[in-house]
């Protein structure tokens, strides 16, 4: 039955995005900014609760899970919505079911957690003497587990009833998928699905009634004493605001879905549809952050010490400049190293600029693969510009120092360049997968809009991710000014912090960053393994793989070995290795990849090689 359904409807069209391209671009920018604010607000609350042990109490643990649930719910909507704003707004049948499941389970999870928070406040205010015996660690863990498992199970049952449903339409009049809209497309709506839906509605309406009753009881109890009333205003008001906002958002959504009128304007319909994914995830961390004293104090402490200008004022009195001690081993070799480095940098500039100009000037090379390659070369120029000029200057200078601000900027440029390299290599792997495994869909998937969207992603995401890391580093008070390298590295600066406890957030964010880009590398490896298996069956595909994928593989291996050597020398501390070898490991990532990549692509990719040879030949003939 399921296979029969798939043969009828494999893709669904989301009709809520029928407005001009100019409006889409403006909405994309506004939505991306809003989503980043949601991520920032919720992650700040989560990190605050995890890092500060005084916040390891039931109320804050429930709040932490509420923020995690907000991230879970919004990730089911915003990435796909942002993608649709710049591309065709279709979604696969399986993707639609998954999106509906994620969004519904997140909304139900909100009500479960708000019910737990209401119960927690009831015990804390009405039965304070037995609070810790009732809210034990085991019970809190069990309640949190239930708040995740029960909504997931309920929504899984709801979604499972739709799997065998035969659809007679493929147009969803909404910005995203929800179960009710899928049911409305069914040729014959499933009876079991209706029963499960009404059970879930009554079940979570029961949660809502329990929350309302508990707060009414709390208000009556707290009106008796000023102390209890102050505690109620301090800890319960944020929950009430969150409840009212969530309930209002769900009410608007239900009104739109169940009783929506065709007389409503498209913009108003869209707002009603997405309000529950727009306001609560943004408002909750702000309300709790401002109202709950412990969290507010923690955030204010971070904010007051975090801005760069403030840090510079307090930090300059201790450290105004850093000393780069990596040059100590080059006392007698500086002129030789300077000459070799200058020659290498000139070659890097020449090779990358040649490739960029070749692709930019030849319209036959204005294809996704070559545009990604052009972006790759531009990123190489950006990264090397952050290292070579300063390095060459230091080789001829009697003192190798760098200002505090300059050190942070250099670390930002170098790290964002490395992360952008990984991102672009990931996109190039995806491009080769589409070209070889799905050639008929290649141009429809990699349209111009999607192409520029991917290019923007490869530039903006590393810049922002590393920006967060550098921002966290800028708030640290440092007790040393010696960097044992040729250049500034964020990890080395963090290790100079006076108090290791201040670097906990830095380590968390750094590890998240590492996991993010390791996942990119795993995707690249998987895609090339899949490509190599696919291309074995066809001589034509095998030739295409060797022609276009081998340069990417060589580039990837060169880059990964460079990063591996740098991590081995920096994080694992190979103290027994001579300093000169450690210095080589440190700069290897800026030495080989920027130089080898344009040479490999220039010689291996036929179109690029012919264009360069043609240009050189014509230039030689004109001289004679």
Image (cartoon, rainbow, N blue to C red):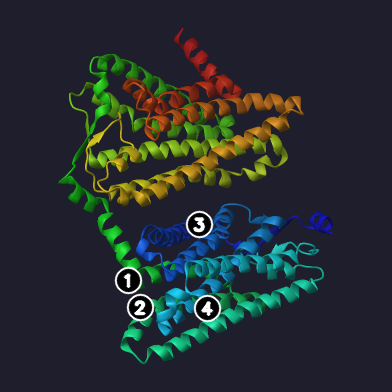
Tell me the distance, in whole angstroms, between the alpha carbons under discs 1 and 4. 26 Å
Where does residue 258 sit, x and y in percent of width and height? 66, 77
- Does any portion of residue 367 appear in the rendered image? no
Tell me the distance, in whole angstroms, between the alpha carbons under discs 1 and 3. 35 Å
Category of crowding for the residue at label 1, using alpha-carbon neighbours closer than 10 angstroms: few (below 14), some (14–19), many (at least 20)? few
Residue plotted at (18% across, 41% down) = 320
Cβ–Cβ under 8 Å for marks 4 and 3: no
- N-terminal of the pair, mark 1 or mark 4, is 4
Where does residue 131 sit, x and y in percent of width and height? 43, 77
- N-terminal of the pair, mark 4 or mark 3, is 3
Query: Relative to 394, is 217 on the left or the right?
Result: right
Category of crowding for the residue at label 2, using alpha-carbon neighbours closer than 10 angstroms: few (below 14), some (14–19), many (at least 20)? some
Cβ–Cβ under 8 Å for marks 1 and 2: yes
Q: In this view, does 423 lie above or below 341?
A: below
Tell me the distance, in whole angstroms, between the alpha carbons under discs 1 and 2. 8 Å
Read off the residue under disc 1: 293
Query: Relative to 380, is 4 on the left or the right?
Result: right
Q: Is mark 2 on a helix, strand or loop?
A: helix
- Could you tell me which quadrant the N terminus lies in? bottom right
Read off the residue under disc 3: 28
Circle 2 or circle 3, nearest the eye: 2
Tell me the distance, in whole angstroms, between the alpha carbons under discs 4 and 2. 23 Å
Q: What element carries label 3?
A: helix
- N-terminal of the pair, mark 1 or mark 3, is 3
* Res 541 → quadrant: top right
Read off the residue under disc 2: 234
Residue plotted at (20% across, 38% down) = 321
Read off the residue under disc 4: 248
- N-terminal of the pair, mark 2 or mark 3, is 3
- Does any portion of residue 252 appear in the rendered image? yes
- N-terminal of the pair, mark 1 or mark 2, is 2
């Amino acid at each position: 039955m399921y296979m029969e359904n798939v043969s009828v409807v494999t893709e669904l069209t989301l009709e809520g995005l029928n407005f001009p391209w100019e409006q889409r671009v403006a909405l994309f920018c506004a939505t991306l900014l809003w989503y980043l604010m949601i991520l920032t607000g919720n992650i700040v609350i989560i990190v605050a609760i995890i890092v500060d042990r005084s916040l390891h109490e039931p109320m804050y643990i429930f709040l932490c899970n509420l923020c995690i649930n907000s991230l879970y719910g919004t990730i089911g909507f915003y990435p796909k919505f942002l993608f649709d704003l710049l591309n065709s707004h279709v979604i696969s049948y399986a993707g639609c079911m998954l999106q509906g499941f994620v969004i519904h389970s997140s909304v139900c999870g909100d009500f479960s957690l708000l019910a737990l928070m209401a119960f927690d406040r009831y015990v804390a205010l009405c039965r304070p003497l037995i609070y810790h015996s009732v809210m034990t660690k085991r019970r809190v863990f069990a309640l949190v587990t239930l708040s995740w498992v029960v909504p997931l199970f309920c929504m899984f049952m709801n979604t499972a009833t739709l799997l065998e449903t035969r659809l007679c339409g493929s147009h969803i009049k909404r910005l995203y998928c929800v179960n009710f809209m899928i049911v409305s497309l069914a040729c014959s709506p499933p009876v079991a699905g209706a029963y499960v839906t009404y059970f879930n509605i009554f079940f979570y309406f029961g949660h809502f009634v329990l929350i309302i009753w508990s707060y009414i009881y709390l208000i009556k109890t707290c009106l008796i004493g000023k102390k209890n009333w102050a505690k109620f205003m301090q800890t319960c008001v944020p929950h009430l605001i969150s409840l009212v906002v969530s309930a209002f958002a769900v009410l608007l959504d239900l009104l739109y879905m169940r009783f929506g009128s065709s007389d409503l304007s498209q913009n108003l319909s869209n707002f009603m549809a997405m309000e529950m994914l727009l306001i609560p995830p943004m408002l909750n961390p702000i309300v709790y952050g401002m109202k709950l004293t412990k969290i507010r104090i923690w955030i204010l402490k971070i904010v007051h010490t975090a801005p760069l200008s403030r840090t510079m004022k307090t930090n300059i009195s201790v450290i105004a400049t850093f000393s780069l001690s990596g040059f100590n081993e080059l006392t007698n070799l500086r002129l030789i190293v300077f000459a070799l480095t200058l020659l290498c940098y000139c070659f890097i500039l020449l090779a990358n600029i040649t490739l960029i100009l070749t692709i930019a000037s030849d319209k036959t090379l204005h294809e996704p693969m070559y545009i990604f390659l052009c972006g790759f070369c531009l990123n190489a120029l950006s990264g090397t510009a952050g290292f070579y000029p300063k390095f060459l200057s230091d080789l001829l200078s009697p003192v190798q120092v760098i200002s505090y601000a300059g050190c942070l900027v250099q670390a930002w440029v170098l790290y964002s360049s490395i992360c952008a390299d990984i991102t672009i290599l990931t996109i190039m792997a995806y491009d080769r997968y589409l070209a070889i495994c799905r050639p008929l869909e290649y141009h429809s998937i990699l349209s111009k809009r999607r192409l520029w969207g991917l290019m923007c992603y490869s530039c903006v995401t590393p810049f922002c991710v590393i920006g967060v890391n550098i921002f966290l580093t800028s708030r640290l008070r440092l007790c040393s000014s010696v960097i044992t390298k040729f250049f500034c590295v964020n990890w080395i600066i963090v290790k100079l912090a006076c108090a290791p406890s201040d670097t906990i957030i830095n380590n968390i964010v750094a590890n998240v960053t590492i996991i993010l880009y390791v996942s990119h590398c795993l995707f690249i490896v998987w895609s090339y393994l899949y490509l190599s298996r696919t291309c074995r069956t066809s001589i034509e595909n095998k030739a295409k793989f060797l022609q276009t994928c081998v340069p990417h593989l060589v580039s990837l291996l060169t880059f990964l070995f460079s990063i591996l050597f740098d991590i081995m020398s920096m994080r694992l501390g190979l103290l027994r290795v001579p300093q000169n070898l450690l210095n080589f490991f440190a700069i290897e990532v800026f030495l080989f990849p920027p130089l080898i990549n344009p040479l490999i692509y220039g010689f291996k990719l036929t179109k690029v090689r012919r264009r360069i040879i043609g240009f050189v030949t014509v230039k030689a003939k004109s001289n004679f």
